[in-house]
Amino acid sequence: MADNPSYKERKVITIGVVSELTGLSERQIRYYEERKLIFPERSPKGNRKYSFSDVEQLIDIANKREEGVQTYEIRQEMLKAKRKEERRYRKELLRGEINARFGVQKE
Amino acid sequence: MADNPSYKERKVITIGVVSELTGLSERQIRYYEERKLIFPERSPKGNRKYSFSDVEQLIDIANKREEGVQTYEIRQEMLKAKRKEERRYRKELLRGEINARFGVQKE
DNA sequence: ATGATTGTGTTAGATTATCTAACACATAAC
DNA sequence: GTTATGTGTTAGATAATCTAACACAATCAT
C-alpha cells in the first residue's frame, strides 16, 4: 500500500512535455506512434496522453535509432519481447505465484 | 534501482488533467495555489505543471474542504506538519541514518 | 539503377487548452 | 455589518495540439 506504482503507467503527460523529457521532436513522437512503437491514449477532444512508461519506451527507441536501428526492426523486437513476456506470465499463473502475491486474503 | 520514485514528484501534468484526476474545477485548483496550499511549476510560457504528489495533496485538500475546513486552517496544518518533518529529518541526519541508506558505496 | 520506403522538417489552418483579470454572489467569520 | 472566503462565469489573449500535406535526403529492394 506504500507507493502507487500505477503512477508509472497513467497516461497524463502531453506531447510537449514528452518532447522535453525525451529530447525528441513532436514530429518524431507522432511518427513512432504511426509505426506502432508507442500507444498514447487520447483525451475526449483528441489530445495525446503519455505515461512515464511511454517516456522510458521512447528513450529506448531514441537510443536504438541512434544506433541505426529502423523502426520496423524495433517493432519486431518489441513484439518478440511481448510474446516472451506473455509466456512467462502464463507460466507464473500456472504455478499460482500470482495468488501467492496478490491473492485473496482475510477481509 | 528498481522503480524511480521521482515519478511521483515530477511536475509534468497540466491543469486540465489535474482537474480530471481530482474532480476539482480549474478555478478551485488555481485558488488553492493563491492560498499557498499547492505549488505548481511553470513552463517557460507560463503554464502550470503539477506532480502526482500535488494531485494527492489536492485530493486531501478537497476532502478537508468537504468537512468544512477553511483553506487558512489547512495551510496552518501544512506548515505545522512541515516543521515537524524538518525536525524529524534533522534528527535523522544527526544519527547518520541517511548515510546508512543513501551513503557512498563501492563504485 | 530505379523505384519504393524510411525518417524528419516544415508549413498552414483549425481547434483546444491555458492564462490573467474582473465581476458577481452566497456563505461564513469577526 | 462589514470583511474574508470560496467558487462560478466571462472575456480576450496567448500557447499547445491536431491533421494533412509537401519536401527531401538517405536507405532498401528489385
Image (tube, coloured by chain):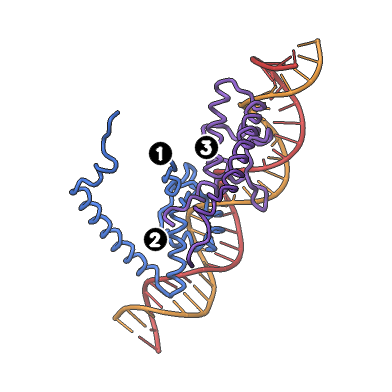
Chain colours: A blue, B purple, C red, D orange
Residue type highlighted by circle 3: Glu
The picture places residue B61, in percent across and down from the top left corner, at: 57, 30
**Sequence-wise first label, 1 or 2:** 1
The picture places residue A52, in percent across and down from the top left corner, at: 47, 52
Instruction: Measure the alpha-carbon separation of dots 1 and 3.
Output: 14 Å
- Residue drawn at x 40%, y 73% as measured from the top left: A69
- Residue drawn at x 65%, y 48% as measured from the top left: B42
Q: Which of marks 1 and 3 is in front?
A: 1
The picture places residue C9, in percent across and down from the top left corner, at: 57, 68
Q: Nearer the viewer, mark 1 or mark 2?
A: 1
Left-right relation of B55 to B75 = left
Badge 1 crowding class, 10 Å Cα cut-off, few under 14, some 14 to 19, many 20 or more, is few
The N terminus of chain B sits in image quarter: bottom left
Badge 3 crowding class, 10 Å Cα cut-off, few under 14, some 14 to 19, many 20 or more, is some
Q: Nearer the viewer, mark 3 or mark 2?
A: 3
Residue type highlighted by circle 1: Met
Numbered circle sitting on residue A37: 2
Badge 2 crowding class, 10 Å Cα cut-off, few under 14, some 14 to 19, many 20 or more, is many
The residue furthest left is: A94
Residue that numbered label 1 is attached to: A1
- Residue drawn at x 56%, y 51% as measured from the top left: B96
Residue that numbered label 3 is attached to: B56
Residue type highlighted by circle 2: Leu
Tell me if residue B13 comes above or below residue B71 in the rendering.
below
**Tag 3, which chain?**
B
Q: Are marks 1 and 3 on the same chain?
A: no
Tell me if residue B9 comes above or below residue B59 in the rendering.
below
**Tag 2, which chain?**
A
